[in-house]
Every structure is written in structure tokens, then in C-alpha cells.
Amino acid sequence: KAGVTQTPRYLIKTRGQQVTLSCSPISGHRSVSWYQQTPGQGLQFLFEYFSETQRNKGNFPGRFSGRQFSNSRSEMNVSTLELGDSALYLCASSSTTSGSARGEQYFGPGTRLTVT
Amino acid sequence: KNEVEQSPQNLTAQEGEFITINCSYSVGISALHWLQQHPGGGIVSLFMLSSGKKKHGRLIATINIQEKHSSLHITASHPRDSAVYICAVLTGNQFYFGTGTSLTVIP
């Protein structure tokens, strides 16, 4: 099976712009989670989608949003970019089923976003 | 206040040594994950635990739910084990992460 893929791998944006990142999960996985990793804060959970519905959300401002399509592919969007949004954004898919605790996470390679 | 604490933060070992990384957490959890991150960013899930002990090759993970503590052991360490090891706990529907342990194994 192909692994989790993320596009683009690298991105440079200017403060105030918006950005959309894409994640394709492992075939058959319906849960997609997004994480932000920075040197200062480490890894932080952004949100999780399951069957096109946001199931869980971390403590991030509303500028961070996401969605999931019927084929389980997911996108996350960050509007009005700030310098502090520079980070590695990781998505992970899981074969967890509805109602159960999220299972083992399979991570993509990440998108490195730089905001200037 | 960090829900997840890892120790040590940095660890240097000689090839062949037995290594232990510790993780303590302060919240009730449904599962604990050990992750490995190599330079360049890629993360691999090593273990998911809710009780007891698991073993994959030279890696062993244990968890004590009553003491809210988990350990990751690496037997016969090798330079390719050099990476950052991250403990993550699932509580309710939130993931909390430790700050990671940076391991360097010297040949």
C-alpha cells in the first residue's frame, strides 16, 4: 500500500496570505489528523477528520481550518498567515473506526511552511 | 504545565548499549504512543500501548497505568537508532505530546 502523501513538501508564503495544504491518506483509512511541529512548541494536535466530519479539534485559532473529502483526502487551510505559523505540518491517517479510540497513526512526510 | 514529561531530553550512547527513555503523564489516557522522528522530519509510529508490554525487534515498550508511566527500551543500540523519540498520549479525543528525547548512538 502507498503511504501517506502530503503536498506540497515546501512552501514559502508572506504574512497575511493564506495557504492550503493537502494530505492523501493510506487507502482504506478514514481518519486523518493534522499536527503542527515547531522548535518552540514541539508537536501539537490541530484537528482530526473522520468520514468528512471534524471529530476533534486542538487549541488553535479559527484561522486554522480543514476539511475532508469523500475519498478521505484532507486539506487544511491557514488564513491570514503570521510569522509564528512557520512550522512543519504533518498529517497522519489511521484505520480507526467510528466510535473507537484513534488507532496507530501513520504519518506523512510533512509540509514545511515558511512565512516571511 | 505539561501533560507529558519525557526524560532524558538528550542521550548519547555507545553502540551496543541498552537504552531507556521514560515518559510520565498526568492525565487519564486511553492509549500511549511512542514515535520516532529522524532528521528531515519523517515520523514513524513505533508502538501504541494501553497496558502491559510490547516488543518489536530490539525495541520494547512498557506502560504502568497506575503509575502513569511508560518506558521505551532499545537493546543492542545501533547508530541507525539515532533519532528523536516522542511520547504521545491520547486522552478523551486530544493528543498530547512530550518534547522528545534526542538519542545519538556513537559507533
Image (cartoon, coloured by chain):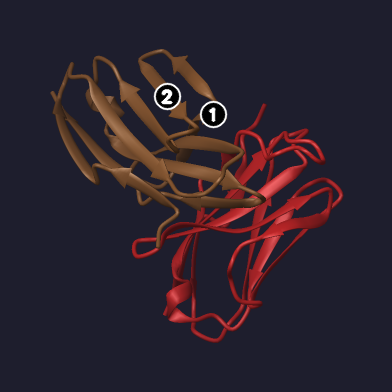
* Residue type, numbered disc 1: Leu
Label 1 crowd (10 A; few <14 / some 14-19 / many >=20): some
Q: Say which element carries label 1.
A: strand
Question: At 79% across and 46% down in the image, what residue appears?
Answer: A72
- Is B35 situated above or below A42? above
Residue A89 circle label: none
Say which residue label 1 marks: B49
| Quadrant placement of the C terminus of chain A | bottom left
Q: Which mark is residue B61?
A: 2
Chain letter for the red colouring in the rendering:
A
User: Do residues under tags 2 and 1 come within 8 Å of each other at their CB atoms?
Assistant: yes
Please provide percent x and percent y for residue B11.
Answer: 19, 38
Left or right: A65, with B4 as reference point: right
Q: Is residue A8 above or below residue B100?
A: below
- Label 2 marks a residue whose chain is B
Between B65 and A1, the one nearer to me in the picture: B65
Looking at the picture, do discs 2 and 1 lie on one chain?
yes
What is the drawing colour of chain B? brown
